[in-house]
Image (cartoon, rainbow, N blue to C red):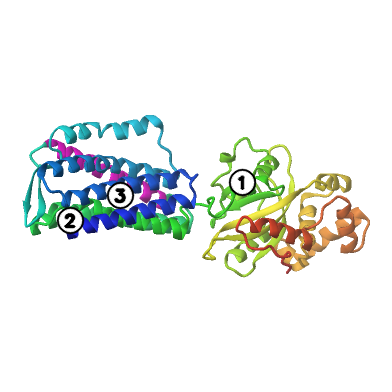
Amino acid sequence: MNIYSTSLLTIFFLIIFLGCYVLLLDIRDKTFQLFFLMAVIIGLWNLFASLVFISETEEVVWRRIRIGTIPAILLAPTIFWFVVSLTGGHLTGWLLLVIYGISVPLHYINWNSFLVFDRVMRTDRVWSFHFNFTSPWIYYWIIYYNLMLVFSLYHLHRWKRKTHSKRAKRQAHTIFITLLVFVVAALIGDYVLFPMVRFPPLSPAYFIIFLVGTCYAIIKFRFFSLTHITVNRDILQNLDEIVILLDEEKNISLINRRAEIFLGLNSVRDVLEKSVTSIFEGSNTFNMELLRLLRGRIKSFSCLLKTKLERESKIVNVSVSLVRDGANEALGILLVGNEILGVRDFVTSYHISNREWETIHYLLQGVSNRRIAQCMGISERTVKAHIKHIYEKLKITTRIQLLNILKEFNIVPLSDRESRLSGENLRLLGASRLESPTKN
C-alpha cells in the first residue's frame, strides 16, 4: 500500500466518522441527514480512489475508477441540496429530479466509455492517469460540477447578507470560506499543480476541507437557528406556559402550541422571523431591559406585555431570560408566561384609560415615578396626575391597596415561587434559571 492509498483510506474513515457524529447529534433533522449522505458519498469516492492505487492490473483499475466515479458525479448536486436545506430553503421533488437527472448522461458515458481519463500507466509501481480532454463529456461534467458549487456558494453568500443574526452570519461565513477554499484547491491541484509535478489527481481528498469546516460550524454554532440540540421541542410543545424564543435580533424563532393558541394564529409561519413587536406592543422599559439582558447586565426580568391582535388585546405576564448553549454562549431570548384574564374586566369596571393602564403596568413592576416618566415619554407631574386619577377611580390611597384590587382580578406579577417553578421547567429547555423581577 503506497502513500496515496494510505492517505485516501485515512480520509475515508475520518469522513465517515464526521458524518456519523453529525447525524447522531439529531438524527431527525433533515439537514443533518443530508450532511451524513454527503459524507457517505465523499467517503465512497475516497475509498475507491484508495483501492485504485493498490490495483494490480489495468482491468481492475478501470473497474474501480468507474465505480468510484458514480459517487463523484452524485456529489455536486448533493452538496447543493445540503446547502439549500442548511440555509432554510427547500428543493421540490421535480427540481431534485432535474438536478440529478442532468447527471444521467455522465453515468452512461462513465460506464460505457471514457469520462475523466482515457488511459492509465504504471510507473515505479504507482498508477498515473491521463485526462480525457479530447472528449466533450469531461467539459460537460466540469461545467455541471462547478455550477452546482457556484450555486451553493451563492446561497451561502445570500443567506449571510439576508440574515440579521450575527451568529448566523458567522456560521454562513465559516462554511462559505471552507467551500471556497475547497473549490480553489481542487481546480489548482488537479488541473494545474499536479499535472506539472506529475502527481496523481486527488480530488476526493480535498473535500475533507469542506466537511471539517462544516462540521466545525455545526458543533460551534449549531447551524443557523435554535434546533433540537438546544431545545427539546417535544417538551416545549407540551408546556402549559406560553413560550416564545427570539434570536439575538429579537426576531421570533420558535413558539409553542400554547402561545400559538393564545395569539390566535392560523399558522406559525405568520410570525416566524418577524420582530417580537409584531405580536406585542413594545414599551421603552421592555426594550431597555432586553438590551440590558443581551449585554449581560441582568440574568432575567419579568414584565406585562399587551398583544397586537385584530379582535381584542390580551395581557400576558412573562419572565424573560437568555438561552445558552453548552459553551455558555447566548443563543437567543426566552419569553415564558401566562395570560392575565382579568385585565379586560378590571379596565371596564373602573373605566381605566390606556395611559392609566400603562402607568399601572409600571407600578406593578415597582418602577419609580421618575422612571415611569422616562419610559412613557411624559413629565413626572403627568405621571403623578395619572396615579391620582387611578386612585380616585379605585377609591384608594396607596399602592398596596392598588395591588390588592389587582389581585382580585388575578392581575399580579409572577411571584418568586412561580418564577422559580418556571425556571425549573425551562432548565429542560437549556435555559438559565429565572430570577425574580428586576426593580429600578
Mark identifier at residue 43: 3
Which residue is at the far top? 94
Instruction: Find disc 1 in the rendering and name its residue.
Output: 234
Tell which tag, 2 or 3, sits nearer the viewer. Answer: 3
| Image point (35%, 52%), residue name | 16
| x, y percent for residue 353 | 80, 49
Instruction: Find disc 2 in the rendering and name its residue.
Output: 189
Q: Are marks 1 and 3 in contact (CB under 8 Å)?
A: no
| Image point (40%, 54%), residue name | 172
State which quadrant residue 30 falls in: top left
Residue type at numbered disc 1: Asp
Q: Are marks 1 and 2 in contact (CB under 8 Å)?
A: no
Q: Main secondary structure of the magenta part?
A: helix
Residue type at numbered disc 2: Gly
Task: Point out the stretch of residues depicted in magenta.
Answer: 136-160
Going from N to C along the chain, the mark reached first, 1 or 3, is 3
Mark identifier at residue 81: none
